[in-house]
Image (cartoon, rainbow, N blue to C red):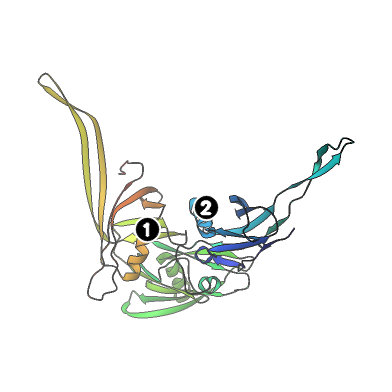
């Protein structure tokens, strides 16, 4: 009894590049096809072949749905096809010509075929590059540069294979406090990518971290203005500002990776109070009072890349607002106005509203 998974998979896939259809040929009457993600069975169904072929569809949506719900950005995928168990059947005839059928207690093991383990990286966008080529040249964010406050930080993540062995470096731009108009640069070698196994690695970049590297190399007071951070062919430009953001949000981006958005924006807080009214004699009293608070935000002008990236927050299933240095609270985003243009004349400003998920305001 033959079972063959005809669709070929690469060892590494972005979820957006997974095949739309998986073809399985068999000579059996039916097959149970199961999809495993991180060894957990997330889908299983019995298929009946037509012309000895079965087509399994929506693999991408099955995998992405599980990874999104579990907040996973990397997982192992395996597809398994299993034939039906067969029970040994014995047919006998008695002297009167009657037929007797008996079934043995032993059952034959079903034929099982599975794909190799496939490493999948969550990604909501399709790319023109093959998955491995994209991952070796991009960080797990759609941003290529960011402006953050000196008190803030930016977490950059990347996927590296055991065979990559790329160097990690930073070119830091700074000035001496004694001569602030002269911009200097410092190249720092920060080691190599991990080579123990295929994995996602992260680095937290901040003004304090980069300033420490400059201080160790120069031994005089300085101010860091920005940096080019490189991991192999990946590059990210980071800039610092003395201006403090109006709000800070954390959200799962297109790669299911936690990004930080420092918003320079104007916020209007609106409070809506609903209640019922009861009159007793000459006195009026309110009851069943409910208070709803909504915060309306209009961002400062954004670049097209920043606007497209921030739009990911609007559709993210997990968004939190930074309350203080140690506390964040989950929020819900609504009333979204997101119009991104590539015009050089029109300023891009995004508008949206947010409220705390539990309905309770924070002090």
Q: For residue 66, which numbered disc appears in the image? A: 2
Graded by Cα atoms within 10 Å as few (under 14), some (14 to 19) or many (20 or more), the crowding at tag 2 reads: some
Q: Nearer the viewer, mark 1 or mark 2?
A: 2
Q: Nearer the viewer, residue 26 or 135?
A: 26
Q: Is there any visible trace of residue 325 in the rendered image?
A: no
Q: Is there any visible trace of residue 172 in the rendered image?
A: yes
Quadrant where the N terminus sits is: bottom right
Lateral position of residue 289 relative to residue 248, left or right: left
Q: Residue at x 21, y 47 (%)?
A: 270
Q: Are the residues flagged by discs 1 and 2 in contact, CB closer than 8 Å?
A: no
Query: Whole-percent x and y of residue 316?
Result: 40, 55
Q: Which SS class for mark 1?
A: helix
Q: Residue at x 38, y 51 (%)?
A: 320
Direction right: furthest residue = 95
Direction front: furthest residue = 96
Identify the residue position indicated by label 1 in the image: 313
Graded by Cα atoms within 10 Å as few (under 14), some (14 to 19) or many (20 or more), the crowding at tag 1 reads: many
Q: For residue 7, which numbered disc appears in the image? A: none
Q: Whole-Å distance between the Cαs marked 1 and 2?
A: 19 Å
Q: Earlier in the sequence, mark 1 or mark 2?
A: 2
Q: Number of numbered discs present?
A: 2
- Eyeballing the image, is 186 above or below 292? below
> Where on the picture, by quarter, is residue 262?
bottom left
Q: Nearer the viewer, residue 98 or 246?
A: 98
Quadrant where the C terminus sits is: top left
> Where on the picture, by quarter, is residue 261?
bottom left
> Where on the picture, by quarter, is residue 271?
top left
- Eyeballing the image, is 93 above or below 64? above
Query: Whole-percent x and y of residue 214?
Result: 44, 73
Q: Nearer the viewer, residue 350 or 109?
A: 109
Query: Whole-percent x and y of residue 336?
Result: 29, 56
């Amino acid at each position: 009894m033959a079972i063959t998974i005809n669709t070929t998979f690469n060892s590494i896939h972005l979820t957006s590049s997974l095949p739309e259809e998986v073809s399985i040929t068999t000579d059996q009457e039916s097959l149970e096809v199961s999809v495993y993600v991180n060894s957990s069975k997330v889908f299983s169904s019995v298929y009946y072949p037509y012309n000895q072929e079965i087509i399994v569809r929506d693999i991408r949506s099955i995998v992405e749905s599980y990874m999104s719900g579990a907040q996973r950005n990397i997982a192992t995928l395996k597809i398994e096809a299993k034939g039906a168990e067969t029970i040994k059947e014995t047919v006998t005839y008695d002297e009167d010509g009657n037929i007797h059928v008996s079934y043995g207690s032993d059952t034959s093991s079903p034929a099982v075929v599975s794909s190799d383990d496939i490493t999948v990286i969550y990604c909501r966008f399709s790319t023109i590059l093959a998955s491995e080529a994209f991952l070796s040249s991009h960080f797990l964010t759609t941003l290529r540069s960011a402006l953050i406050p000196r008190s803030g930080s930016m977490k950059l993540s990347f996927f590296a294979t055991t065979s990559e062995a790329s160097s990690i470096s930073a070119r830091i731009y700074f000035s001496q406090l004694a001569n602030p108009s002269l911009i200097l640069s410092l190249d720092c070698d920060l080691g190599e990518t991990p080579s123990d196994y295929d994995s996602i690695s992260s680095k937290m970049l901040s003004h304090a971290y980069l300033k420490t590297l400059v201080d160790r190399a120069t031994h005089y007071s300085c101010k860091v203005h920005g940096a080019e951070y490189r991991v192999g062919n990946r590059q990210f430009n980071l800039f610092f500002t003395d201006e403090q953001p109006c709000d800070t949000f954390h959200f799962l981006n297109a790669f299911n990776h936690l990004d930080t958005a420092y918003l320079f924006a104007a916020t209007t807080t609106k409070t809506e109070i609903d209640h019922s009214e009861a009159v007793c004699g000459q006195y009026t009293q309110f009851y069943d009072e409910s208070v709803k608070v909504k915060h309306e935000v209009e961002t400062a002008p954004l670049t097209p890349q920043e606007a497209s990236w921030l739009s990911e927050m609007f559709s993210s299933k997990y968004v939190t607002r930074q309350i203080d240095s140690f506390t964040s609270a989950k929020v819900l985003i609504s009333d979204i106005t997101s119009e991104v243009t590539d015009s050089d004349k029109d300023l891009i400003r995004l508008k949206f509203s947010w409220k705390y998920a539990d309905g309770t305001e924070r002090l």
